[in-house]
Image (cartoon, rainbow, N blue to C red):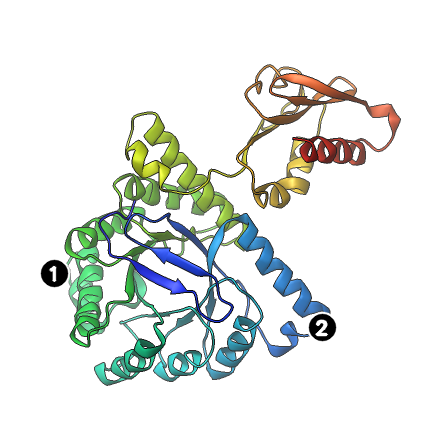
Amino acid sequence: MGGKSRIVKIGGFDHVESLTLGGGFPVAIQTMWKDRLSFADLEGAAGECLVARIARLRAMGCGLLRFAVPDLEAAEVLGALASAVSLPLVADIHFDYRIALRCLDFPIAKLRINPGNIGSREKVEKVLAKAAPRGIPLRIGVNAGSLPHDLRREVDGGGLDLAEALVRAAEREAALFEEMGYDRYLVSLKASSPAQTLKANRLLAGRSPAPIHIGVTEAGPLIAGVVRNTAALHPLLSEGIGDTLRVSLSDTMEHEVIAGREILNAVKDSAVSGVGISDADAEGEGSRGVVIVSCPRCGRNSFDTHGFTGRWLHRLYALDKNITVAVMGCAVNGPGEARHADLGITGSGNRVLIFRRGTVIRTIDAGEGDPAALADQAFAEALENL
């Protein structure tokens, strides 16, 4: 994936981790912080929790973390946070180029600007002039809802297809970047329609060597958002289009990262099955990580799969292991159904079974104590010894 795009390096200065995009390097998963931050959020116990959550996102597979920066005060807060964490942070800026200039004073790894609202050519030139000597990449982020006015009028009047308008908006900004000798940029074209997102990114990939960030914007709540993003991202990635991605959800950052990982794993699975991208491309996507298989639960249930998965989800996705974990509710979908799993847990009557590759290695009687606590302890010990 991304083999045809040029390479752009992010971070790698001060204490900030280095990330390479494009040129066949692994696709990086992004998410975006859901709330506005203040200096109070960086202090004391709150600050420790914030930094710990960012570390957890990184462990789960997040390669870039983006923050909305609506004003200069928010730029100051993000600058302070960027000095405290190693994960590359991205400043998302609209309307006011001066915010971008201020962000460039801090160890912020990347900027995102929108050509539909960032302002005149002179303002963009000032941002590029300050970013260039610092080696800070920019993303030209075009959204269907914030096209330049002239392109919006053409689309609304029926004279221009939305996908083509998105590409033209990006090409205009890219031409200015290139004119100034600035090639450390990425491009994203997003719409709330998977079909338009697909069409726009296919057009762009055929016309630009820039690395592409892909995603469906305003995709909706968890289920709808995952479905809509998968509908667009899976075919794009299978065609080798996309160097970073974000699964935009009206849900948690952790779920965005998990969804991104699962989409990448699904693309790999298609490649191994002879569908879509080549095996060589699939190998370039980085480690598979933990894969969780779990039954949906039914009237045969004798183990709370939902509760157990909820307690363990983030911990499992943060593990640096290439394993399959099975969480099953009854004997029907127990060790036999999930015999391929490296580690599993299931209910069987009034017992809970821990199994490894189809073989039961521990049995817990529900009468021994709190079933959930016993299951968690037994599973943790088995995982430790895996």
Q: Is residue 270 above or below residue 123?
A: above
Between label 2 and label 1, give the one nearer the viewer.
2
Amino acid type shown at disc 2: Gly
State which quarter of the image contains the N terminus: top left
Q: State the image coordinates of residue 249 (x, y, percent, origin top left).
A: 47, 52
Which of the 4 image quarters holds residue 217? Answer: bottom left
Q: State the image coordinates of residue 145 (x, y, percent, origin top left).
A: 31, 64
Residue name at image x 51 percent, y 82 percent: 73
Residue 32 visible, this orientation: yes
Q: Is residue 107 above or below residue 328?
A: below
The image's mark for residue 159 is: 1
Residue 215 visible, this orientation: no
**Which of the two labelled residues, at mark 2 and mark 1, occupies the earlier sequence position?**
2
Say whether marks 2 and 1 touch (CB < 8 Å).
no
Residue name at image x 43 percent, y 61 percent: 18
Residue 187 lies left or right of residue 360; in this view the side is: left
Q: Is residue 109 above or below residue 363?
A: below
Which of the 4 image quarters holds residue 307? Answer: top right
Which of the 4 image quarters holds residue 308? Answer: top right
Using the numbered discs, state the Cα–Cα distance from disc 2 to disc 1 in whole angstroms: 56 Å
Q: Kindly state the secondary structure of the residue where label 2 is placed.
A: helix
As rendered, which of 250 and 180 lies closer to the eye? 180
Q: State the image coordinates of residue 14 (x, y, percent, origin top left).
A: 48, 71
The image's mark for residue 44 is: 2
Q: State the image coordinates of residue 362 (x, y, percent, origin top left).
A: 75, 21
Q: Kindly state the secondary structure of the residue where label 1 is placed.
A: loop
State which quarter of the image contains the C terminus: top right
Amino acid type shown at disc 1: Gly
Residue name at image x 11 percent, y 60 percent: 159
